[in-house]
């Protein structure tokens, strides 16, 4: 009968297991992200929102009065991307710009009543989709998934800090 050491040496390494291949997991993650994004985007289109519009509106439900620069940082996009999107949402009556005392170049962004109602509809769409999909996983799996996602986020932050590119990114 083989010893414990012999059995351990003969057992496949976790890294030789194809399911433990980080690149394979990455591609599965990206494909899942695309599938989920496409599904949610389709549901948001029915209420007249694109994903970028929803992202901006829902971010303002969390914190109003931010500048376009702060909003761009929270959304991981350029200020130029946010500027055009804000212009369109202001024209649609969903967002308003308010002057900031002592700062003639920046404006604080706020939701209008219509913008808040539309953001809340979008949030409800997301919540329903999450309940139908991710919410169907066992609680233990959700706890483990959150642990893994947070660990991955921490590794990504470390990599950003090591490369000097992590400045100004959102903290979630």
Image: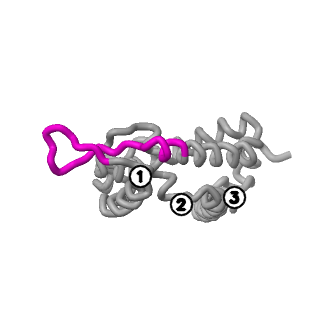
Q: Name the residue under label 1.
A: 75
**Numbered disc in front, either 3 or 2:** 2
Q: Residue furthest right?
A: 1
Residue 84, percent across and down? 35, 63
Query: Of marks 2 and 1, which one's residue comes earlier in the chain?
Result: 2
What secondary structure is found at the residue carrying circle 2? Answer: loop
Q: Mark 3 points at which residue?
A: 19
Q: Can residue 115 be seen in this view?
A: yes
**Quarter of the image that includes the N terminus:** top right
Query: Of marks 3 and 1, which one's residue comes earlier in the chain?
Result: 3
Nearest the viewer among 111 and 1 is 111
> Residue 33's image quarter?
bottom right
Residue at 37 percent of width and 42 percent of height: 110
Residue 76, percent across and down? 39, 54
Nearest the viewer among 167 and 55 is 55
> Looking at the picture, does residue 79 appear above or below residue 64?
below
Q: Name the residue under label 2.
A: 50
| Residue 109 included in the magenta stretch of the image | yes
| Left or right: 99, with 25 as reference point | left
Residue at 65 percent of width and 48 percent of height: 125
Residue at 72 percent of width and 41 percent of height: 135
| Residue 142 included in the magenta stretch of the image | no
Nearest the viewer among 18 and 121 is 121
Q: How crowded is mark 1: few (under 14 residues within 10 Å), some or many (20 or more)?
A: some
Residue 154, percent across and down? 45, 44
What secondary structure is found at the residue carrying circle 3? Answer: helix
> Looking at the picture, does residue 57 appear above or below residue 17?
above
């Amino acid at each position: 009968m083989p010893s414990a050491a012999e059995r351990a040496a003969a057992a496949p390494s976790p890294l030789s297991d194809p399911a433990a291949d980080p690149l394979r997991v990455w591609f599965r993650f990206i494909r899942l992200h695309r599938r989920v994004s496409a599904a949610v985007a389709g549901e948001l289109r029915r209420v007249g929102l694109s994903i970028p519009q929803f992202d901006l509106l829902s971010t303002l439900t969390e914190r109003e009065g931010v500048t376009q620069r702060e909003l761009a940082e929270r959304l991981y996009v350029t200020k130029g991307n946010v500027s055009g999107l804000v212009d369109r949402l202001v024209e649609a009556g969903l967002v308003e710009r308010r002057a900031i005392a002592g700062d003639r170049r920046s404006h604080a962004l706020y939701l209008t009543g219509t913008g808040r109602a539309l953001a809340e509809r979008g949030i409800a769409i997301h919540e329903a989709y999450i309940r139908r999909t991710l919410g169907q996983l066992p609680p233990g799996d959700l706890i483990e998934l959150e642990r893994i996602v947070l660990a991955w986020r921490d590794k990504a932050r470390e990599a950003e800090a090591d490369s000097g590119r992590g400045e100004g990114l959102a903290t979630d």
